[in-house]
Image (cartoon, rainbow, N blue to C red):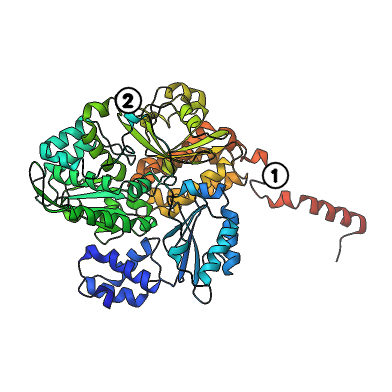
Amino acid sequence: MEVIKNTTNRTSLLNVLWDIQKKRRHISSEDMVKIAKEFKMSKMEVEGIVSFYHFFHQSDVGKYTVYLNNAIISKIKNHKEVKEAFEHEVGIKFGHITADKMFGLFETSCIGLSDQETAALINYRAFTNLTSEKVKSIISQLKSGVAIDEIADFPEDNIQYTPSKNKIVFFRNYEPFSSLKKLEDNSPEAIIELVKNAKLSGRGGAFFPTGLKWELCKSQKEPQKYIICNADEGEPGTFKDRVLMNKLPGLLLEGMIMAGYAVGASKGYIYLRAEYSYLKEKLEQTISEFKKQAWLGKNIKANKTFDFEIEIFMGAGAYVCGEETALINSMEGKRGEPTTKEYFPVEKGYLGKPTVVNNVETLCAVPRILEMGVDKYLSIGTKLTPGTKLMSVSGDCKKPGIYEIEWGMKLKDFLKLIEAENPHYILYNGFSGECLSEADLDREISGENLLADHIQFEFNDPIEYARKMRGVGLRSGGSFMVFNKDRDLLQILKNISDFFVEESCGVCVPCRTGNFLLNKKINKVINRHADATDLEQVKEWSNIIKQSSRCGLGKTSTNCLLTAMLKFPEDFEKGLLAESDFNHTFNLENATAEYNAIINEIESTYGQSN
């Protein structure tokens, strides 16, 4: 088979699968047999990998494959109208392809365009701010042979706010290579010390100290090391990394080059989520420019010359690959399942070698810190979390988009900044974050008090919670979705639950089965078929999932549900039996009592029938 000839390195497997998927619109059983032979794998293993990723299919998905976002921000916009328009224009329901195999309609989770909903991908090109009229025009043009690139949208960089000029970190003026030139005056050890002194921590949400991670990797004796940029921005409601890669791709490369220099790595990879395929060309062009300017390749000029290369690795649609060990498994040509972390990636990561995995925002911060100087950087933000934070804002507000805010801003001030419209429910940090309410308005967006992680689920009384959490910082991965009082909290939580049921890798029982059972309980509450016992079971099962799951997906999958139950108990009480006419238990004798009384009356009046 021509697409895999002389390509037997397991790390190239996903590239081969992508080639076949794009050329043939599916990966057939015959394809998998040939792949298995070439890669010395069993067909069953290949099929397990193909079935793991959302964008690999085993049957034809059509010449034009539509993926419509069905996450909650899309749902509160005009998802229903857009979905019906697609179905009407192509003549099929979602989940099917047309008889002529020209169109395939599918739904997918958040595609990183929450500020421009309703949005869809067609052949991995973005189409934003969709309406029924726009859908009609798109389908008509595709049917008439217009090239898809001529009608696709390129997502806007809606940067709504930056702090005062002297406090901007990310979106200040960018001069290509300016920070790299400073490497001549800084040893690898000095760069690590700089990052440590700046108190930079992981901006994907885990907040692990970046300098410490780099130091641990550098200390490994293995000469071959890797830098991986985690650009698998799959957390619903988050799109800050999309904007950084589009607006400042060079800044990202500079951060990766500095990381490679600091830890002694000679190779870097950008793990780019499939939903951001339209950014690949710009990233590749930027990589080429860096090579031309001798900032990538052999003998890069610095205090100590070094070698470093960067390649792009395409993901294939799996939320769990945002977890670093799952991402590494994916790059190694395996199912993107998290490992038990017998070793951390800095010890044994990609191909068993020491590996640093940082997200886009974290890497972009490093060259800015070097440009500004540590003292200047530390003067911005708060003592524990200096600098600024990028926030992806969507939902019921007048100004959705990207906000670069100084750490320490209070939640109530941020709501004013985005011009939130009658805010009531706030999903903070995406679906794996927490549900905020009026009780949190005086909290600041910072990491000043990390006690929040340990106490936020220990209360049953919202007032006690509000009192205890006042002064506790809100650490942010970057997603901020706001909903007004007219939104249905239970439907929001159902959308979140559906997402985790779909995205669980299925390896561990607590996450796989627990989230499925919680989903059924939420249905029960929505239908007003629940009782107080059901709500207690939701809390109990949620905590079991948090405590027993193998990776971060399961451990955080019930955060929003638990915090919503604490802060909005009245929304759940509406779903109890007392508010409905549902019969909790069916009793045959009671159900037939009226019928039997009528029969007895007839028999007593007219005599027993023959």
Instruction: Depth check: give the residue in front, 215 or 419.
Output: 419
Badge 2 crowding class, 10 Å Cα cut-off, few under 14, some 14 to 19, many 20 or more, is: some
**Pointer 2 or 1: first along the chain:** 2
Residue 382: numbered disc: 2
Instruction: Depth check: give the residue in front, 514 or 233.
Output: 233
Residue sitting at the far right: 606
Residue located at (50% from left, 36% from top):
426
In the rendered view, would you say 233 is above or below 13? Answer: above
In the rendered view, would you say 23 is above or below 253? Answer: below
Task: Count all numbered tags in the image, as a single digit.
Answer: 2
Q: Amino acid at mark 1?
A: Asp
Residue 209 lies, in percent from the top left, at 24, 35
347 vs 79, left or right, is left
Residue 581: numbered disc: 1
In the rendered view, would you say 127 is above or below 406? Answer: below
Instruction: Depth check: give the residue in front, 603 or 309.
Output: 309
Q: Quote the CA–CA distance across marks 2 and 1.
A: 54 Å
406 vs 435, left or right, is left
Give the quarter of the image for residue 367.
top left
